[in-house]
């Protein structure tokens, strides 16, 4: 059940997204820019700070509500680093750090990326690189889990001088930040693994991206159904053909499974659940996008038709914060370590818990 | 629009209930009452079903007045998924517990509820489901088996086919035509429960491609069915099929048929498999986890009195797809080189053979994939 504050935030978000995320704004964003009026409205409505504690200007938005917000953002293909801000807020709150002023991003996005921390005379420096940083060129700083093994800490690191710009298949900025012994300002580093589990950023990343994907899937289904009802061939709407109906049924089933996986993970957000949700939703995304493009055919292939806004994002988001392959392997190793008899209890006995001894 | 499966937290004591079921399964297994077989939960084992009934785990949600236990749909869900996930042999009582008991509870007479449901709840009474006919599979309203009015009841003539377990059953539910098909072919169909010991019934076992003969063709030659065995109103049986098939389709048995094979795979692949194997196993785990949540959600919706016909079709379509994928995946990950070294009677080889050869049935029984998707499309407002 959602509390009143969450409901207000969601109502506001839906209004802002519907008003501000126009085709013109989406088209402009494909050039790599961040629409200033949109971002201004998102921040002034308190959306980007929602997961921060009250003392830091937020409302400590609970995870379930934050995921609903992420799903709504996915449904509108919001071209702004809102989800990154929500995750940053959760990680900062857990580490007891203050948020930087301005646009913030989070990392690492690729499971293999790791920043090194060094300490000399009490001063910390950061080295290494973070690839595929969402909206990196627009961010003033990133909230990052840095360091090795059990020495990992949450840090807030400013955008370095060296930024290599790139984009994903949906033309969203995905940049590389290169750090060469960059000093870390005081108050920008948290204690070792405190509070919120130090693994949590990657689980959050996976789960929030998955929530955006479910929002995008909602739209893919809606667009496909609408197109099938509107498009007349052989003298009737193609929705009347059984071959088309069977595909739409399959599409709807994939979307339903994706939404169910998201809801289940949101209700018991442990490592296993976040990983399983990213895997299942990622697979649904691939299946659903393929079906939708078959249904919407040549019209759906055009830039003018809205379908690609969502399918391109779905294709891209599958690979961020761990692909289906990454998380499947991670899950698979947990499963085999417990043996055949241990498989079912893994699903039933301790939902919502990070399996012990898991990296 | 999309179909909604609200997450359903299980009741507080679900953990204890789970533990009780697991203890029961261990104890009965140690006592030699059962062991996992190639047929997994599809194994017929009357002593096991009787023990389960004794324990109060059949007809769990039915009123106590009718031999039930007045437990919640979610409690029943927990017990059910534990039995299925461990491959407990539940075939004997399964159709009665899953769909025929609920059918009688919804449409049956007071006499039927008082007489039949307590029998079903013991676990010892098996009920077969008679829907299909030689010329009526997916097209259910094309049935030709007819029942004609006679003194005190009905006289049934016709044939039913693909009837699982008819040879072990005390009763069979019959979908019969009691008046000719009119404008609407769905009118004039009635449902009755026939005593399998009645005169005029002939059974012909059908051997299937996986080597068993537990399907039957059942021939009715002037079989008398007394009035008291008619379920619901004469001519109105079509309306019953929806909720019955919803119960059949949404049950977790639709994504646990290959779980025994999956467990073999986990054990045989070892603790440090190659990347491709770990990835494939993790992917299946994510699918099972998702379906488990969807099935629990349906149990929650049923508990709240919601109709879940379409949701059940979604779960069966996704679940049977998974159940058909698993045998082939096991084949690829544990290749012939590995399998050739095993003794011919190795339980793993036995289960793989049966699992693979039986798997086409998953997308036939309880409604073909195409029929399910027609129903889902109807739920989307397309039909």
Image (cartoon, coloured by chain):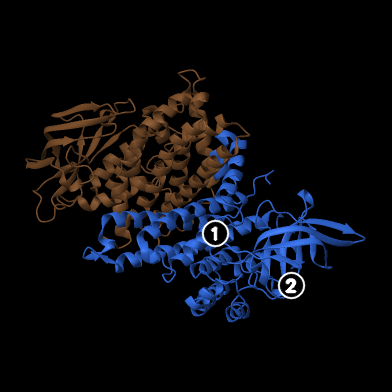
Chain colours: A blue, B brown
Residues under numbered marks 2 and 1 in contact, where contact means CB atoms less than 8 Å apart: no
Quarter-wise, where is residue B210 in the image?
top left
Chain at numbered mark 2:
A
- Which chain's residue wears label 1? A
Q: Position of residue A112 (x, y in %)?
A: 68, 51
Q: Is residue B307 visible?
A: no
How busy is the neighbourhood of tag 1: few (under 14 within 10 Å), some, or many (20 plus)?
some
Secondary structure of the residue carrying tag 2 is loop
Q: Residue furthest right?
A: A121
Can residue B70 be seen here? The reply is yes
Q: Earlier in the sequence, mark 2 or mark 1?
A: 2
Are callouts 2 and 1 both on one chain? yes
> Of the numbered discs in the image, which one, if any, rests on residue A160?
none
Q: Quadrant of residue A142?
A: bottom right
Q: How many marks?
A: 2
Q: Position of residue A123 (x, y in %)?
A: 88, 63
Can you tell which quarter of the image residue A242 is in? bottom left
Q: Which residue is mark 2?
A: A100
Residue found 36% across the figure and 63% down from its top: A298
Q: From the viewer's perspective, is residue B202 above or below residue B121?
A: above
Residue placed at 35% from the left, 57% from the top?
Answer: A248
Identify which residue is drawn at 67% across, 45% down: A358
- Report the side of B106 relative to A41 (left or right): left
Q: Which residue is mark 1?
A: A316
Q: Position of residue A225 (x, y in %)?
A: 35, 64
> Residue at (23%, 45%) from the top-left corner?
B138
CA gap, disc 2 to disc 1? 28 Å
The percent coordinates of residue B28 (x first, y second) are 48, 28
Q: How packed is label 2: few (under 14 Cα within 10 Å), some, or many (20 or more)?
A: some
């Amino acid at each position: 059940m959602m509390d009143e504050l969450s409901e207000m935030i969601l109502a506001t978000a839906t209004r802002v997204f519907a008003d501000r995320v126009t085709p013109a704004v989406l088209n402009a964003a494909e050039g790599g820019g961040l629409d200033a009026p949109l971002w201004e409205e998102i921040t002034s409505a308190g959306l980007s700070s929602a997961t921060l504690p009250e003392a830091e200007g937020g409302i400590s938005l609970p995870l379930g509500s934050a995921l609903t917000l992420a799903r709504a953002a996915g449904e509108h293909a919001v071209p702004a680093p809102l989800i990154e801000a929500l995750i940053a807020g959760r990680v900062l709150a857990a580490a007891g750090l203050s948020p930087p002023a301005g646009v913030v991003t989070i990392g690492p996005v690729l499971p293999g990326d790791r920043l090194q921390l060094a300490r000399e005379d009490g001063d910390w420096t950061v080295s290494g690189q973070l690839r595929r940083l969402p909206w990196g060129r627009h961010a003033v700083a990133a909230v990052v889990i840095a360091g090795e093994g059990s020495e990992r800490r949450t840090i807030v690191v400013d955008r370095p001088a060296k930024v290599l710009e790139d984009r994903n298949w949906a033309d969203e900025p995905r940049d590389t930040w290169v750090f060469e012994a960059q000093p870390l300002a005081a108050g920008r580093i948290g204690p070792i693994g405190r509070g919120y589990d130090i693994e949590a950023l990657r689980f959050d990343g996976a789960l929030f991206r998955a929530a955006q994907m479910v929002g995008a899937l909602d739209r893919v289904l809606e667009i496909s159904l609408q197109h099938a009802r509107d498009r007349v061939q052989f003298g009737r709407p193609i929705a009347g053909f059984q071959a088309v109906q069977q595909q739409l049924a399959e599409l709807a089933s994939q979307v339903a499974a994706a939404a169910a996986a998201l809801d289940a993970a949101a209700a018991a957000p442990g490592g296993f659940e976040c990983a399983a949700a990213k895997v299942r939703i990622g697979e649904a995304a691939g299946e659903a996008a393929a079906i939708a493009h078959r249904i919407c055919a040549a019209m759906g292939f055009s830039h003018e038709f809205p379908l690609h806004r969502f399918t391109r994002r779905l294709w891209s988001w599958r690979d961020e914060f761990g692909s289906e392959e990454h998380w499947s392997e991670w899950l698979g190793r947990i499963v085999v370590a417990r043996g055949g008899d241990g498989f079912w209890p893994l699903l039933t006995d301790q939902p919502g818990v990070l399996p012990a001894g898991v990296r | 629009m999309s179909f909604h499966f609200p997450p359903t937290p299980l009741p507080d004591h679900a953990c204890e209930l789970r533990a009780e079921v697991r203890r029961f399964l261990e104890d009965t297994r140690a006592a030699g009452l059962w062991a996992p077989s190639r047929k997994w939960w599809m194994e017929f084992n009357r002593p096991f079903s009787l023990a389960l009934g004794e324990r109060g785990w059949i007809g769990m949600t039915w009123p106590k007045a009718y031999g039930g236990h007045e437990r919640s749909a979610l409690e029943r869900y927990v017990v059910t998924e534990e039995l299925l996930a461990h491959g407990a042999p539940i075939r004997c009582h399964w159709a009665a517990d899953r769909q025929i008991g609920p059918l009688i509870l919804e449409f049956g007479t007071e006499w039927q509820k008082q007489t039949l449901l307590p029998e079903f709840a013991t676990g010892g009474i098996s009920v077969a489901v008679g829907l299909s006919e030689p010329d009526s599979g997916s097209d259910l309203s094309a049935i030709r088996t007819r029942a004609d009015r006679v003194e005190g009841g009905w006289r049934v003539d016709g044939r039913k086919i693909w009837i699982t377990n008819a040879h072990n059953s005390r009763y069979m539910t019959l979908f019969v035509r009691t008046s000719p098909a009119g404008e609407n072919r769905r009118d004039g169909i009635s449902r009755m429960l026939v005593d399998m010991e009645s005169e005029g019934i002939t059974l012909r076992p059908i051997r299937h491609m996986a080597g068993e003969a537990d399907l039957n063709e059942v021939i009715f030659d002037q079989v008398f069915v007394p009035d008291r065995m008619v379920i619901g109103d004469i001519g109105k049986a079509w309306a019953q099929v929806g909720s019955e098939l919803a119960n059949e389709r949404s049950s977790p048995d639709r994504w646990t048929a290959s779980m025994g094979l999956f467990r073999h795979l986990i054990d045989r692949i070892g603790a440090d498999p190659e990347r491709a194997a770990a990835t494939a196993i993790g992917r299946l785990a994510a699918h099972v986890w998702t379906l488990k949540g969807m099935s629990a959600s349906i149990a929650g919706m049923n508990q709240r009195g919601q109709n879940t016909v379409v949701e059940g079709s979604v779960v069966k379509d996704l679940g049977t797809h998974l159940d058909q994928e698993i045998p082939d995946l096991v084949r690829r990950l544990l290749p012939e080189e590995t399998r050739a070294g095993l003794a011919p009677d190795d339980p793993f080889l036995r289960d793989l053979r049966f699992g693979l050869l039986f798997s086409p049935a998953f997308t036939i029984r309880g409604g073909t994939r195409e029929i399910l998707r027609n129903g889902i499309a109807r739920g989307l407002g397309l039909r």
